[in-house]
Image (cartoon, grey):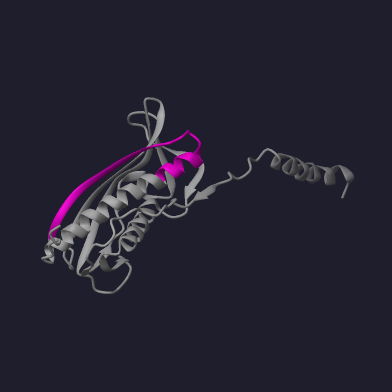
Amino acid sequence: MSLRLFAIPLLIVLSFISGCNVVPEAESVRQFMLPQTPIDFETGRQQIQANLRVQTPEPSGVIGGRRIAVLPGDSEIQTYRGARWSEAAPALLRDRMIEAFIENGRLASVYDGETGVAADYQLLSRLRAFQSEYVDGEPQVRILLDAILTGSDGREAIASERFEIRESSASEDIDAVVQSFGRASDRLSKQVVEWATEQIGEARGFRPSPE
């Protein structure tokens, strides 16, 4: 084999190695859990002997995944680059609501939809908004949840309610936005817990003691 023939494939290999330098590096992705703070519930309330299963909210569109949604305009939906939730957003909100029910302590037990234990009631919901929006040029987290409380089989609705929370962010920085998601989720969870326990109490024939 001549040196000239050997040089041709060598040049191809060198060109390939040199071309690798222009391939972009993989995007660095930060993962965020949903921040939580203890919720200040009214103490001394009588416990209700009932079990509740909290199902994962049904999502709408892009908010069903792990990307953190943002609406920079009236109708365009985007996601924050290089940032993800640690789990799908509906699962994060479900877990926060369950934790809030436990913090409240009025129901005998609360668990998620994957638990095989029989439940007296079920909390079904549809998550219609879980995103950051810009209002007058400032970022603001919005959560919109349609909740339905049903009996054990999930077929008969006992009560339904819509919950909407807006929480301003200190800045456009993703860390500040995530903190706003946490505060908004805490506020929404408190409202859901108070509403659901009241409905279950009435269904059980519970009446608060006169003051």
Name the residue rendered at 16%, 65% in the picture.
Answer: 151
Q: In the rendering, at what x and y percent does residue 73 appear?
A: 37, 28
- On the question of residue 81 being in view, the answer is no
Please identify the residue farthest to the front as the structure is shown. 211
Residue in front for this viewpoint, 112 or 51: 51
Q: Quarter of the image holding residue 45?
A: bottom left
Residue in front for this viewpoint, 39 or 28: 39
Residue 14 to residue 125: above or below: above
Quarter placement of the C terminus: bottom left
Name the residue rendered at 16%, 58% in the picture.
Answer: 199
Residue 97 to residue 172: above or below: below
Q: Which residues are magenta?
A: 157-181
Is residue 162 toward the left or the right of residue 101 in the image? left
Residue 174 counted in the magenta span: yes
Residue 8 counted in the magenta span: no
Q: In the rendering, at what x and y percent does residue 50 appear?
A: 21, 69
Q: Quarter of the image holding residue 154?
A: bottom left
* Numbered circles on residues, count: 0
